[in-house]
Image (cartoon, rainbow, N blue to C red):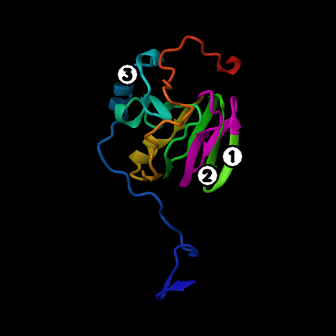
Amino acid sequence: MEILGRESHYTSTKPRVFVRGLEGKYNLKEELKRLRSLPRVIRGDEIKFMDGPQSFSKHFVEPVDGMTQTLHIHLEEYAPGGTNQKHGHVNEAAFYILDGKGYEIHDTIRYDWEAGDVAIVHNNCVHQHFNADKYKPARALVIKTKPMYLFMNMLFQKNVVARPTEPTPEGRGFEPRHYEDNFNHLDD
């Protein structure tokens, strides 16, 4: 297929370079010293959930803190009947469902999940997460490769539909479980 005398990048058979050259000061010895000086245990009870009122996040490890080179790890809690923003990003994500029942919409396709499942969000997928239970919260541990994409200058993220600013009728007054002492969510 040719567009204005040029071959389309969708059908080209020519070799392509997808990653830009990586440049800058990087000394492995210094970086290992820096990483080894950082905490190895992050206390969950010292971090509160943010955002809301339908979707809350508790960030344990994220790119801005420099604690890891490849991982972004956070906990998501969805209020009863809650959802988050519809969005897309270049990096992949894995959601380990700790409790509750819900579903994802990925590029217009629905995927149901429940406690014990892992939901995978692929690169460049427009998606949204939903708690299907109108009376109980749902929770997922999220692991992303976002720092690596930042390092390679390949990060792209866009909201398609904003995060809800009002609670669901069933979720009015819901507070995320900031400081819990029962971690056996499957028995709730």
Residue at 68% x, 29% y is 115
| SS for dot 3 | loop
As drawn, the label of residue 106 is 2
Neighbours of disc 2 within 10 Å: few (<14), some (14-19), many (20+): some
The span from disc 2 to disc 1 (Cα, nearest Å) is 8 Å
| SS for dot 1 | strand
Q: Amino acid at mark 2?
A: His
Outermost residue to the top: 181
* Residue depth check, mark 3 versus mark 1: number of the one nearer the observer: 1
The span from disc 3 to disc 2 (Cα, nearest Å) is 36 Å
Residue 167 drawn at (x, y percent): 49, 36
Give the residue pinned by disc 1: 111
Q: Amino acid at mark 3?
A: Leu
Residue at 45% x, 34% y is 52
Residue 154 drawn at (x, y percent): 42, 53
| SS for dot 2 | strand
In the displayed structure, does residue 11 sit left or right of residue 85?
right
- Per the rendered image, the range of residues in magenta is 113-137
Q: Amino acid at mark 1?
A: Tyr
Outermost residue to the front: 169
Quarter where residue 20 is shown: bottom left
